[in-house]
Amino acid sequence: MPKYIVYEQPISERIRVFLRLESLFDQMSYHERGGSSWDSAAVLSGILDVKALFSRSDLKIEIVKELDRQIATLGKLVKSPEVNREQLDKTLKEFERLAKRLYVLPSQQGPQRNEFFNAIQQKGCMTGGSCVSDLPIYHFWLMQPSERRRQDLLQWQQGFDVIRQAIELILRTIRNSGTPQNKIAESGFFQYTPDTSTQLIRILLPESSPYYTEMSGGKHRFSVNFMKASFSERSEKSSENIEFQLSCCML
């Protein structure tokens, strides 16, 4: 069975932010398994990025709104004979459990009024600002035993767990709502008018394909250019007809 590289284009800003959160959580999960100071630095950087996203808007409300929206949408499928009732009930219970936990969660996550974090954030805006000469306390922390650093990171991530679970469930449910369809991009270009309820566009290309996608557009129309990848020169748009799979995800 061929393996694919998946390219995604969110239709709404809400889903775009959720995808960014998912990427940050995935990177943090990967480095949490390591014990080196570089792993700890990567996790800490992820915590700061997640905290920054939450400081710009009330993401907790956006996540709760999306959970409630999906609960209402899935609830309408209960009487459908084509639905696996047992699996649907299980999914609905998981949505409701996470929604209840989020209702009582503070809007701002991550360390608050923490001088150590503030110093890293301020210096982190500078190129190379996290070096020893600029942030000796950060260097001191990175030189602590791995278990001490791991405990600190767990403490600083309090509240992230339920958010991570909610984002994972929301995006997984949206992705599973789409069915890949075979399409052809003539001369490396494809344009499509999605259903107004589409939330996420997914394009699947075989791992062996020399192309990647550049997508743009919104809920009314989106377009895709298939680019020939180059890492030494400027990538160029393909002039060939390219077979790919398209999945318009809506829930």
Image (cartoon, rainbow, N blue to C red):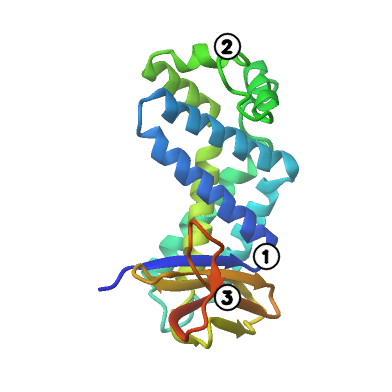
Residue mark closest to the camera, 2 vs 1: 2
Q: Which label is found at residue 225?
A: 3
C-alpha gap between disc 3 and disc 2 = 47 Å
Q: Amino acid at mark 3?
A: Asn
> Circle 1: is it few (<14), some (14-19), or many (20+) Cα within 10 Å?
few
Which residue appears at 51% of the width and 11% of the height?
Answer: 140
Does any portion of residue 75 appear in the rendered image?
no
Q: Is residue 36 above or below residue 249?
A: above
Q: Is residue 196 above or below residue 232?
A: below
Give the residue number, with chain letter if any, for mark 2.
Answer: 136
Which residue reaches farthest left? 1
Q: Which label is found at residue 102?
A: none
Quadrant for the N terminus, please: bottom left
Q: Residue 41 at what x, y percent from top left?
A: 49, 27
Q: Is residue 245 above or below residue 96?
A: below
C-alpha gap between disc 2 and disc 1 = 42 Å
Q: Amino acid at mark 1?
A: Ser
Quadrant for the C terminus, please: bottom right
**Cβ–Cβ under 8 Å for marks 3 and 2:** no
Q: Is residue 66 above or below residue 80?
A: above
Mark 1: secondary structure: loop
Q: Amino acid at mark 2?
A: Pro
